Amino acid sequence: MRALLLGLILAAVAGAAWQRDVAVRRLPPDYDELTYLPVAYRYEAMLASGRWGEVAKFRENFEHPPLVKLLFATGLWVSGAPEPEWKQVEVGHPLPAAAVPVFHVTRGLSAVMGVLQVALVAVVSAPGALLLAFDAYHAKYTSQAYLEAVPGLLAVLAVLAFERARRTAPGSPRAFRRGPLVLSGALLGAAAACKYPYGLVVGLALAPFLGLPTRARLGPWGVFGLATLAAFFLLHPGLWSSPVGNLWESVSFHWSYSQSAHVQRAGLPWYQPWLYLTHPEPVRWHDGVFLTGASAWLMVPLAVLGVPRAARTRPVWLAWAGVGLVFLMVWPTRWPQYLLLVLPALSVCAGLGVETLAAQARRSWRRRAGLALPPTA
């Protein structure tokens, strides 16, 4: 059994690395990449010339926090990749040779973060990690210069740290380990400083496990909340000059955008996220890039099957999956990359569904063989 588990983990990580390497090299430029990469070059110019104060004042693409774009900028600065002529880079068309270095550097950063997500999910559920490794949406948006890969990794780390914080000493079932709780809050704040919805969704998923904020439980709430806020503001330079005003300016854009003519013209129904979850559209959009669309067909039914086991053994991941799915249906902007808010948690639930099927198969085999059944886990 250990050999099988190790084999699944290795297959998931190696498969994730291979699939993202292929996607990094073969995917054509996408819409948001042509927004974020020119901005990254503006940041790169500030960093290279030591104009650090200008970073906090920069307002282009201010609706999204700057952290991921600063990471892209750092990669461009270190690599020395020259800025291409953006008019020659067209969405859906092959990359011109002059643009290959910048896309290789920034997409490579995203791909590494995507593979690390798969590796960490494998710690929780090896079958779930295998599904995530080849999920076409996860592979696509963690192989492009999008904002999804870094906050996704930080969110997974925040949940793992929170689970560790809940593993309390005997005799104190309601206590939290302070160190892991501080770490979880800091990671959550960092995820929000990359892209707001990751902090919102994962924060709402974790909050019930802290309990009602009564006087007896103010300690965990205070530790977790202060760590989250401190990391968020420290890593979001755009808020330093006027935290409340700038945050409102940045966040309010998203509601206005969700009501914009662009979103209204798309006319995506409230159930569009479910269509994405069950239809591997990137396989159709990008012929020959993604190995399989099977994850999209298997993920939801296996996750439903895994709900009871997840509720017993991994309730935090189940809460993340539930909150994430509700958010996807409620939020009016329903672009496919938003699926990455929920895919790591959903893949864990699906992996537990695979484990449920395996346990049922073992019990059935034992009954047929006339062997004694072990106690139910």
Image (tube, rainbow, N blue to C red):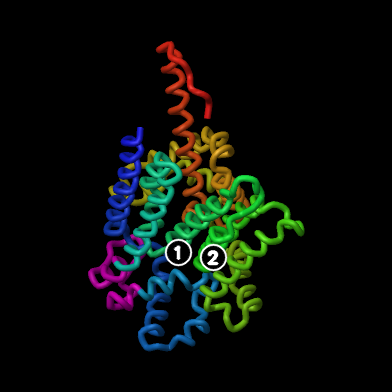
Which residue position holds label 2? 186
Q: 150 or 362: nearer the eye?
A: 362
Q: Is residue 262 among what the camera can see?
A: no
Residue 225, horizontal then vertical, whole percent: 63, 64
**Which of the 4 image quadrants contains residue 80?**
bottom left
Q: Is residue 60 among what the camera can see?
A: yes
Q: How crowded is mark 1: few (under 14 residues within 10 Å), some or many (20 or more)?
A: many
Confirm whether the magenta stretch covers residue 87. yes
Gap between marks 2 and 1 measured at Cα: 19 Å
Number of labelled discs?
Answer: 2
N-term mark: 2 or 1: 1
Kind of residue at badge 2: Ala
SS category of the residue bearing label 2: helix
Describe residue 100's horizontal placement relative to residue 136 as left or right.
left
Residue at the (45%, 38%) spot, across then down: 351
Residue 188, horizontal then vertical, whole percent: 54, 62
294 versus 85 height, above or below: above
Q: 206 or 130: nearer the eye?
A: 206
Q: 336 or 228: nearer the eye?
A: 228
Quarter of the image for the N terminus: give it: top left
Which residue position holds label 1? 147
**Which of the 4 image quadrants contains residue 127?**
top left
Confirm whether the magenta stretch covers residue 330. no
Q: What stretch is highlighted in magenta?
A: 75-104
32 versus 329 height, above or below: below
Which residue in the rendered view is the most extreme toward the front? 171
Residue at the (32%, 60%) spot, across then down: 28
